[in-house]
Image (cartoon, helix red, strand yellow):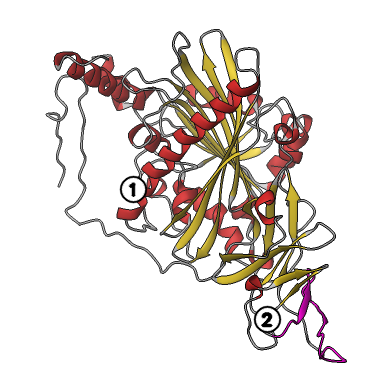
Amino acid sequence: MHVERTDLLKGWVNVTVEVDNDEVRTIEAEAVPTRFARGWHCLGLSEKFKDGKPHTVRAFGQKLVVFQSGDGKLNVLDAYCRHMGGDLSQGTIKGNEIACPFHDWRWGGDGRCTEIPYSRRVPRRARTAAWPTLDQDGMLFLWNDPEGNPPPAEVTIPRIEGATSDGWTDWVWNETVVHTNCREVIDNVVDMAHFFYVHNSFPTFFKNVFEGHVATQYMNGTARADMTQHAKDGALKMLGNTSVASYYGPSFMIDDLTYHYEGMDVQAVLLNCHYPIDANSFVLHSGIIVERSEKFPGEAADEMARTMSKYILSGFNQDVEIWRNKTRIDNPLLCEEDGPVYQLRRWYEQFYVDVADVTPEMVERFEFELDTSRPIEAWKKEVEQNLARRAAEGQPA
Amino acid sequence: MTIRTDNRLLDGAPMQSLACRQCGAAVQVRKASWQQTSIQWDEDATNACLERRATGGGACGDVFLGCTALSETIAQAALDGVVTVPDDLYEHEESQ
């Protein structure tokens, strides 16, 4: 059957719908992976773990203990003591070791039992699971690898210059638990159109580059006249933004973000990162720092960072609302104006297989570029219609 | 997980081979419209690209946005009809 319809959306663009057959499209989805991604995962601001107490973290389907040893280092171990299964995260830090609350067995950051105060000898095989850690730019990272190998030298988290500079604000940080598989948050890397429909932004240029363990999204946007901008500030008019956001590995995204105002730019770094609690939930983090400038000196920049953080959080909530209600889909039906969802998932798969099974297609460079002139014609119309409707209802634009 | 094939590659234009006129790097290219371009590189192509090499090739957190010589090659190939560009419905209707 072939049907041509030109009656849709009358008055501004004719749409031709081609239907080749009557078959119903089926949504397909395999079970969520039981394996967790290989890579560096951020557990949050490291300061939080430096209060002299052990911390419980549920991640990768397990319970972990995070503790700062006497030497200042942050360590991550499986929370359950190999002796009788006590919970080390309920224990006490004693020198460089975490002491189990059950029988006081002492465990070092390398996962080895160093001492049993009531015994002359530590039994053989007294070793528990330990995760390599990285305390960098105010954040604690953990290396997860189901094969148990240490992180390769070339797989690193880049330094963030502003994070340790007086010329920038401190991190404004937020954490949210999301009850779905973490692939949903990854899909956003390529999903240009949702930025208009879910986040009320207006992309004008969009590009993805996947190469090695890095996946990047370049996006330029203009301010929407029909939406209140987060930093609308008297005479200061927001014009748009330029964003370069890269995932370094499966879970940690750094977004170099420039907000363009009339006569000035504001530089910010936005982090969007997560770690899986289990196959069906993850902890989503956002962090933001803003560069202090002539227009935003001292406290004004901190205030700006807090305001932007609230705005980003409301953006996360918009995503979460979609994720809570949607279904997992392995065979999305894409139109030509959509981003490279399949190619992104091919890239993402490298973190879920053994290193020996990573294929060239997963890591070879792929580029997808879209000058959004076609989508924005439709979006311009929608913005105009919103403004016209409000004017008719007597509301301010 | 099985990685499926993009429905747009099954139903629309396929990827086509093209060599950069500057360095000869052979890539796979697809244009869904005059506005959209996909480029699949392989290891030989990434090693051959002069612009990529000149920018450090994406080491240390600097991501290589793209090669201008390759972009120009693709643009010319599209104009010459070497790379197929499907009729753009929207532009077609605009001109009516």
Q: In the image shown, does A353 or A144 lie closer to the viewer?
A: A144
Looking at the image, residue A286 sits to the left or right of residue A95; the answer is left
Q: Give the residue at x 67% y 79%.
A: A101
Sequence-first disc among 2 and 1: 2
Q: Give the residue at x 28% y 21%.
A: A383
Quarter-of-image position of residue A350: bottom right
Q: Give the residue at x 65% y 88%.
A: A84
Residue A307: percent from the left, percent from the top? 49, 29
What predominant SS class does the magenta segment belong to?
A: loop
Pick out the residue farthest to the right.
A120
Residue labelled with disc 2: A81
Q: Is residue A60 visible?
A: yes
Q: Give the residue at x 54% y 24%.
A: A242
Q: Secondary structure at mark 2?
A: loop
Residue labelled with disc 1: A322
Residue A210: percent from the left, percent from the top? 59, 44
Q: In the image shown, does A150 or A345 lie closer to the viewer?
A: A150
Q: Amino acid at mark 1?
A: Ile
The chain that hosts pointer 2 is: A
The local crowd at label 1, few if under 14, some if 14 to 19, many if 20 or more residues have their Cα within 10 Å, is: few
Pick out the residue farthest to the left.
A7
Q: Is residue A108 magenta?
A: yes
Q: Secondary structure at mark 1?
A: helix
First to last magenta residue range? A103-123
The local crowd at label 2, few if under 14, some if 14 to 19, many if 20 or more residues have their Cα within 10 Å, is: many
Q: Amino acid at mark 2?
A: Cys
Q: Is residue B74 visible?
A: no
Q: Is residue B15 magenta?
A: no
The chain that hosts pointer 1 is: A
Determine whether A331 is above or below A171 in the image. below
Residue A246: percent from the left, percent from the top? 60, 40
